[in-house]
Amino acid sequence: MLNFCPGLRGHGLALIAGAVLPLSLAPFDLWPLALLGLALFARLLQGLNSRDALARAFYFGLGYYGSGASWVFVSIHEFGNTALPLAVVMTALFVAAMALIFCLPWALISKIPSGERRIMVNSLGFAGLWMLGEWLRSWLFTGFPWLYVGYGHLQTPLAGWSPVVGVFGLGLIIAYSAAYLSNLGMAFRSKQAKPPLLTGALIVIALWGAGQGLRSQVWTAPKSSPISVGMVQPNIPQNLKWAPHFREPTLDRLRSLSESLWQKDWVIWPEAAVPMLYHEATDFLKEMDQRAQQEQSTLITGILYDDHQQRKYFNSVLGLGTGMGLYHKQRLVPFGEYVPMESFLRGLIAFFDLPQSVIHAGPREQLGLLAGDIRIAPSICYEVVYPGLVSEAAAQADVLLTISNDAWFGGSIGPLQHMQMAQMRALETGRYMIRSTNNGVSGIIDHQGNILAKSEQFTLQTLSGEVVPMSGLTPFLRWGSAPSLLLGALFVIVGLWRQRRETPGNRQAA
């Protein structure tokens, strides 16, 4: 089978298809574009050998990450103190590296049958490779689990599948639907294609219909009465965050904004809200602890914790007042919190010497936080984008909490994408999610992924609302992503087996 758009023209179309795909996600939420972009990508891969398929997938990845992760430039240039030309080069290298990782699974697409009679096998194989690629990008080189197509379906019929299969399973369903669409034009011209065309249509209709039906299914139940929550969004400029002369103004801002919130059950401050190391801030923390106990309230704050015994620094979240617990962040941001290949890179440019880039990863087994008898599963900033990490903690908790400082994103689309991923974690786990940030978007999300209260960006404000502690486990909390990953791998294996069986040499041997 010949490719319908060979050479550079096909690569250009793949670049465009990749660039369009992030428009299906926040803040644009044009979810049908994911189906169209993936359908075009699937069609552009058909009839290519492994080398050409890798090249085409690389161009798609360039468009995908160049468009969807453009906020990386803001972090490097505006807040990493990197000169414009070098920031452009570093951003381009990041996008190219992500495109290289993205294209790896697509070397196998040429080994999966395509054509009028192989619509089902081809569509399932494409879907399996897409989902396995998303999973690969969640852990390879510490992972960058951003821009998953499932995030655009919080309000579509497929949302019902989220608590069952998680965001990876959603990607499998979306990619299958798109691959089926890509085969429609070719299939209508062939009588041989009518049976698989009908079967494929029934599967797509069943998947989307079942998703709509599952939206009314409630997997978890309230554990107790609602809890009142107040959040402080101090809106500290990133260039002043750690400035010594701005330390006292920051502490005063936290004090004054919290005064109207002490009647709430919980008061939440964002990531690293206290601009000092833990052992430097003991007097201030004691003051706030006493204030919270006086009002019978729980105060939860982000802080950098200096462990003198281990000679390590942790990005942490701390419970005070009627709350207790100390959680250390496990998944760190490269360059922002630690420097890969530190002995080679440290000192080369200002971006490799950011003041927070000395953080150590916390241990895997941590208890989280307690507020009375309510168990809280915390995640710090980037951690909320890891489905497995959040679900593992959520299974033992009643409420989810994520704190962040999205000032690093500036006015880009990054904070809105970040908020959308927090919504998906709430929907997957059937738990309320509190999201407290330095400069927005802060919010309260219910157990079905709906935003109940939301702050404005770049404003100094407080935000109040209620969360309901939830008990019970969604299917995703019970089994995680393993069933979806196994199913996707099976689709790929079946496709490879069918292709091998149908090659002339193997047919004769059989």
Image: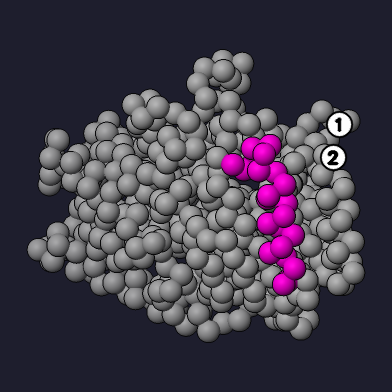
Report crowding for label 2: few under 14, some 14 to 19, many 20 or more residues within 10 A (C-alpha): few
Q: Secondary structure at mark 1?
A: loop
- Amino acid identity at mark 2: His
- Amino acid identity at mark 1: His
The segment highlighted magenta reads 240-261
Q: Residue at x 50, y 70 (%)?
A: 161
Residue 407: in sight, yes or no? yes
The answer to whether mark 1 and mark 2 are in CB contact below 8 A is yes
Is 121 displayed left or right of 472 in the figure? left
Judge whether residue 249 is colored magenta. Answer: yes
Classify the position of the C terminus by image quarter: top left
In front of the other: 393 or 198: 393
Classify the position of the N terminus by image quarter: top left
Q: Residue at x 34, y 26 (%)?
A: 85
In front of the other: 231 or 8: 231
- Image quadrant in which you'd find residue 442: bottom right
Judge whether residue 13 is colored magenta. Answer: no
| Residue 88 pos. (x, y %) | 35, 31
| Residue 187 pos. (x, y %) | 16, 62
Q: Pointer 2: what residue? A: 279
Question: Sequence-wise, which precedes: disc 1 or disc 2?
Answer: 2
How far apart are the two marked residues, 1 and 2, measured between alpha carbons? 9 Å
Q: Pointer 1: what residue? A: 308
Q: Residue at x 31, y 54 (%)?
A: 21
Of labels 1 and 2, the one closer to you: 2
Residue 391: in sight, yes or no? no
